[in-house]
Image: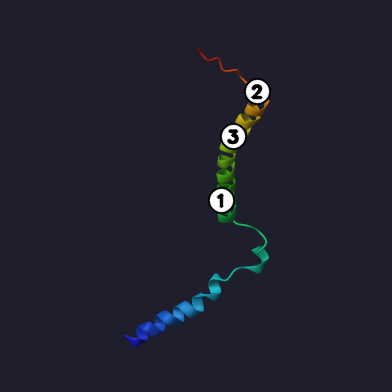
Amino acid sequence: MRALINTIVMMIVTATTAFAANPGNADKPGLLCWAFFGICVAIFACQMVPAAIMWVGAAKALTMKPVEVKTRR
């Protein structure tokens, strides 16, 4: 059992250097990075639609002439 644990530990320790990042590719964002930025932009754009509708409504309310209310007597 001890030999099996030692073998697994040695495989993990020696395999970590194989997965190290290549410094030549460090300045190039990958597909996962671009997907994350795309989702952030989509969320931002979806939140801008209600804000634009609210701004248009506020502009209409500010430029509208006051309406006289007729009451019955």
Q: Does dot 1 land on a helix, a strand or a loop?
A: helix
Q: Residue at label 3? A: 54
Q: Are the residues at dot 2 and dot 3 in contact (C-beta closer than 8 Å)?
A: no
Q: Quadrant of residue 68?
A: top right
Residue type at mark 1: give it: Ala
Q: Residue at label 2? A: 64
Distance from label 1 to label 3 (Cα)?
A: 30 Å
As drawn, 45 above or below 15: above
Q: Does dot 2 land on a helix, a strand or a loop?
A: loop
Residue located 59% across and 32% down the image:
53
Residue located 56% across and 52% down the image:
36
Q: Nearer the viewer, mark 2 or mark 3?
A: 2
Residue located 57% across and 49% down the image:
40
- Measured as percent of width and height from the top left, residue 19 is found at 54, 70
Residue type at mark 2: give it: Met
- Measured as percent of width and height from the top left, residue 48 is found at 59, 40
Residue type at mark 3: give it: Met
Distance from label 2 to label 3 (Cα)?
A: 15 Å
Distance from label 2 to label 1 (Cα)?
A: 44 Å
Q: Residues within 10 Å of mark 3 (few under 14, many from 20)?
A: few
Q: Work out whether mark 1 precedes mark 3 in sequence or the reverse, and give the earlier one.
A: 1
Q: Does dot 3 land on a helix, a strand or a loop?
A: helix
Count the marks. 3
Q: Is residue 6 left or right of residue 23?
A: left
Report the front residue among 67 and 36. 67
Q: Residue at label 1? A: 35
